[in-house]
Image: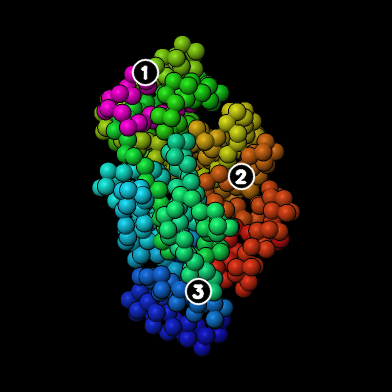
Amino acid sequence: MDAPTSTAVIEGLRAIVGEKACIEAPGDMQPFATDYRKLYHGKALAVVLPASTQEVAGVVALCAAHKVPVVPQGGNTSLMGGAVPDASGRAVILNLRRMNKVLEVDTVNDTLTLQAGVTLQAARAAAEDASRLFPLRIGSEGSCQIGGNLSTNAGGTAVLRYGNMRDLTLGIEAVLPDGRIFSSLRGLRKDNTGYDLKQLFIGSEGTLGIITAAVLKLMPLPRATAVALVAVQSPHAAVQLLTEAKRIAGQAVTAFELISAPALALVLESMPQLRSPLADAHGWMVLIELSSGGEPGSLDATLLSVLEEGMAQGLVLDAAVAASGADAQNFWRIREEISDAQTREGGSIKCDISIPLSKIADFIAEASAAVLALAPDARMVIYGHMGDGNVHFNPLKPKGASSAQFLEANYARVSHAVDGLAHRQNGSISAEHGVGVAKRDDLSAYKSEVELELMWQIKRALDPDNLLNPAKVLPQAA
Ligand code: MLT
Ligand code: ZN
């Protein structure tokens, strides 16, 4: 881009969002241009912080007129490099954090209408203030934003019971690549008037439009919860235990999270203030949560029945049941810290696999053998949403080794081995983290020609100049 164009664009941006909301100093832009795991280091022409949908539309239209790429950004917690620009310095980062208003809590329609920059934590708090639950639950809830949750179709630890972001959304508002505004903010549970256009924007990682607001579903706030950390014989035993839990507790099964021994050890080593509630070390654990609208305490006996059945069948080796809300929070803290503990070690090889539940345990065994054949010393950090057939399969460098060297030597071959195995078993290579840059080119190997053609046709129809979050999601060779 020539100097007069970039000057005109920056002056135009300032006029739309105001001087204070337009950042141009390289040092100030750097945190916006670097991803959460510090693996992608981009550069930007400017960072803008619009305060309204109209301002977002103005910025996008201005950039479209000058053929300047726009990278939408929420809390910048993407694990796939999806929310940062490339290193060319041509793109404008459009960060939505100033659009952080809860617009309406409707306790009759059971809906929450809010701007895209509201954090997940604030959305959950707004629901709770009205004695309702907004059920999306992920470890980064304090910083991730609803717009990012929508654009990646976020999942997390309660999908088993409530579904992912797509299931929890009734309407969205989005700014299109030419600056027009699409809106379906009507809070309808039924609307069969043609294509469900909002679905184009959910999960497309800002490549088709910038989500600026949404209407989300609210659920009854659970009154009874029961939580246990359970040592199991193996991943196969975990799957059988889940089947028993569903038989005994039915819909109350809210979370069923797998944790491998290296995943637990990593958290406990890096956070000495946390302690495992289990007396001994075990190869595999599951964190189970039951919840319902019944009387507080009413699920305690149900959870015990699940554990007794698991012990009787030889699936369960040991279990710690949370005796209080604080205990339960501590159990969850251990699980939720696994992600950051890997980042502190320099980042792992991120594979985010889903497989039909009936095959997930075999997959874990086969993929582990394949990884250890390639990187015999890797720490097998395997954890996640077993109840959804979704595991985060994240081989990590051996203790004390150089992270850069480990990732350089192993990232491509290990992730191809794991993803290839998942693909051959009809699984997905990105269950809930999206594609971003990290998995972008891999899609050529894992999507059919028809799927890739359709994706490009939709992209070109909405964004013919390829300006919205370019070089994300779609394989560049196609
Ligand atoms: C999680 O389940 O903890 C998140 O998806 C983040 C991660 O896997 O790193
Ligand atoms: Zn996850």
Distance between the alpha carbons at the discs numbered 1 and 2: 36 Å
**Is residue 295 inside the magenta stretch?**
yes
Distance between the alpha carbons at the discs numbered 1 and 3: 56 Å
Q: Quadrant of the C terminus?
A: bottom right
Q: Amino acid at mark 3?
A: Gly
Q: Which residue is mark 2?
A: 429
Q: What stretch of residues is rendered in magenta?
A: 284-304
Q: Amino acid at mark 2?
A: Ile
Q: Position of residue 230 (x, y in %)?
A: 41, 24
Give the mark nearest the N terminus, 3 or 2: 3
Which secondary structure lies at badge 2? loop
Q: Is residue 10 above or below residue 443?
A: below
**Viewer-side label of 1, 2:** 1
| Near-viewer residue (429 or 55) | 55
Q: Which residue is mark 1?
A: 304
Q: Which residue is mark 3?
A: 179
